[in-house]
Image (cartoon, rainbow, N blue to C red):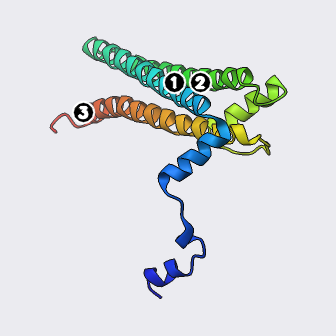
Amino acid sequence: MTFANLLERLPGLNSLPSLSTLFAEVNADIGNSDIVFLLIIACLILTLHGVAVLVIAGIFHWIDDKLQNKKVYGANFLSYFLAILLIIAIHLLEIIAWTYICIGLQVFPTNLQTLYFAGEMYTTVGFGNYTLIERWKIIPIIISFTGIFAVSLSGAALYTMMGALLGRSNQKTNPGS
């Protein structure tokens, strides 16, 4: 069976909406101003996250260079651990920020339910069974989108920091290379 034959067997393939039709339907559900507001908030959160992680990584590399020049090797791992804690704190602050945004939009009746929802969507766990009104069904997509990209940015920064530490330990054990 070829791929074309598989596509022919899909019953809804012939009735796919255009991208503009799909976007218009989303706008009709949640309102144009609400989706624009949420997208701007998502962009701001990701921008602030990127800047914060960049600052943490920059400070780590500056401290790492200073400690290497003074031949203080064990302290480098302490600075890496502190960088991890700071990045975790940033993620928790972003979950709290999404909680307050959802509280302001009155997505859920209780603050605790809103916190659990924001945390699950940000981390893309999706454990809870949340029923959203049509107007807010786009929120999980936007929150999880910011969470996925924020974690990716953090992971990349932590990877470069760990690379600096591991690269140095390889240089100590293999002085000829």
Q: Earlier in the sequence, mark 3 or mark 2?
A: 2
Circle on res. 94:
2
The reply to whether the C-beta atoms of the residues labelled 2 and 1 are less than 8 Å apart is yes
| Residue, disc 3 | 171
Which of the 4 image quarters holds residue 93? top right
Residue 152 horizontal/vertical position (percent): 46, 37
Q: Position of residue 126 (x, y in %)?
A: 70, 45
Where disc 3 sits, the SS reads helix
Mark 1 is surrounded, within 10 Å at the Cα level, by few (under 14), some (14 to 19) or many (20 or more) other residues, namely: some
> What residue is shown at x 73% (from left), y 42% (from top)?
134
Residues at marks 3 and 2, CA–CA distance in whole angstroms: 38 Å
Which residue lies under the disc numbered 1?
45
Q: Which label sits in the foreground, 2 or 1?
A: 1
Query: Are there few (<14), some (14-19), or many (20+) residues within 10 Å of tag 3?
Result: few
Q: Residue furthest right?
A: 109
Q: CA distance from mark 1 to mark 3?
A: 38 Å
Q: Secondary structure at mark 1?
A: helix
Q: Earlier in the sequence, mark 1 or mark 3?
A: 1
Q: Which of 165/125 is in front?
A: 125
Number of numbered discs visible in the structure rendering: 3
Residue drawn at point x = 35 percent, y = 32 percent: 160
Q: Amino acid at mark 2?
A: Glu
